[in-house]
Amino acid sequence: MKDVGYELVATKMTVESPSAVVALFRGDVKASADRDIPSVSSQIATTEVRLTHLNDDLEEHLDLPKMTSFTFSGAEGAPVQGFMIPPPKFDATKKYPVKFLIHGGPQGAWGDAWSYRWNAELMAASGYVVVMVNPRGSTGYGQAFVDGVNGDWGGKPYVDLMKGLDFAESKFAFIDKTRECALGASYGGFMANWILTHTDRFACIVTHDGMFNPESAYGTTEEIWFNEWEFRRTGEVAPGQPWRYAAGPAANDPFRRWSPMLSIQSAKTPTLVVHSQRDYRLDVSEGFQLFTALQRLNVPSKMLYFPDEGHWVLKPQNSKLWYETVGDWSDRWTKTNLYAAVANYRAAPGAPAAKDGAKGKGTTGKAAAPAVSAAPAEVAPSSAVTATTTTSSERDLSQRPGEGEDFTVAIGTPQDQVKVGSDAKVTIALRNVSDHPVMFAHRPGANNPEYSYRIVVKDAAGKLVEETAYGREALQHQQEESRTVEYVQPGKAAVQTAHLEKLVNMNRPGRYTVQVFRKDAKSGVVVRSNELTLNVVP
């Protein structure tokens, strides 16, 4: 490309940005007696010019935090590298839940790179600190470091990972150690299974296409040379094969020594199992074996099954469902986002304390449906039901959900400041946190949350704001028996938008607070949302 002045044209990516085409212009090379390649390359002055701008407009509107690198002493004192990405709008004085990502391979590595699968920035975007560690077996640190995983799958790499998280917890004070989720795929899935069966430090686990039973995985993979290489005994040249070690003790058999299945009775942590039918690297039976064991042991668990994917989830709609399901599982067990209202309520003075070991309701004993649709809820045919509504009495509205609530209600607003007379919108999300469909009865017609919830608006003095004629009509219609009934599936949400200016007279500037209440049709318990503040300006 020298005829147009370019010395080099290449693609460039970082953890904050997908690939773009750049041109590098070379400057002068500084004089040096040392002519080896690393020294020369460091002495070349280059100017970089970006040639493509496909994502510029989008990236300008995204908060993509910078990644921080850290180094700690891993197994046997070896230096090990890790990374941390904070969430958007990061505040170091707050505490954040953690997504602890474990890479596959094991001959792979986290680094300053973008991926559409297991995207670290997207993992952090929902309010999490993302921690990533490159344990023994990772590439980029020399061949001895890579070889450190051979025949030692649950040994030094596991120690590296746990020490890395220990170091991150001590270095970054904003990490909430009680709200951590471990997530891994492929070898990372094996390690997630190993973690599941060897520690209970995590609030939840996501294991994707991981090895659960090394002996069965040996006979069902299309990459048999890899298993024979990785599961050899130390110092052996002959391939690792299960029958060669069967007569000896388990400690001398890598297939049994590093088998999560043989320690599954120790599992306690709520686990999301993800596996795909067309995975020939690690057969789908590995996921089914794990899920079956968790169900039989009554460990809270769920399986996301893709009938049309392989070792990687590549189809866009499947990827969307994957991120939604993984994110929801993390939120559920770390009490984050839509599940935070329940956590905050239980932490409030006078709230009933959660029972020991009661991390939540609704995941044991039910398998997930095939992952072929991202629909938020299945809708049952319209029927006439007896409406159970919330009254306007303060005594009734002060009720709180008990230990076995089936749903949560959370609210948000697109903007926290509006002008007098403007459309003050509030988004209401009813999230099913049980293991069964939740009946959601509402007024017939599209998107009428004013008739489906008790929406309370108070002024700065704490007084109820006067209702409009529409608001009074909405209260009256809440008593009617004819309703449309939908069934919100486990882990899904019914989302609606309410228009406050239609309900109450917000014709004066000031600070208003909004809360939403809904009564459980079966138990009669009133579930209260979080409270948000809305500023109305002239």
Image (cartoon, rainbow, N blue to C red):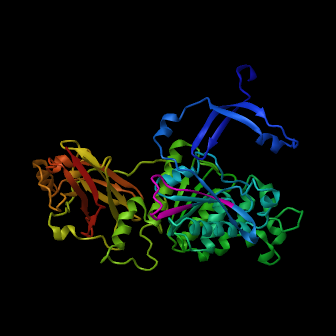
Residue reaching furthest front? 31
Residue 133, placed above or below residue 534 = below
Residue 209 seen by the camera: no
**Quadrant placement of the N terminus:** top right
Residue lying at 51% horizontally and 51% vertically, measured from the top left: 323
Does residue 468 belong to the magenta stretch?
no
Residue 487 placement: quadrant: bottom left
Q: Position of residue 10 (x, y in %)?
A: 69, 33
What residue range appears in magenta?
A: 81-99
Front one among 10 and 439: 10
Residue 73 placement: quadrant: bottom right
| 201 displayed left or right of 163 | left
Front one among 153 and 376: 153
Residue reaching furthest left? 469
| 26 displayed left or right of 393 | right
Residue reaching furthest bottom? 356
Does residue 90 belong to the magenta stretch?
yes
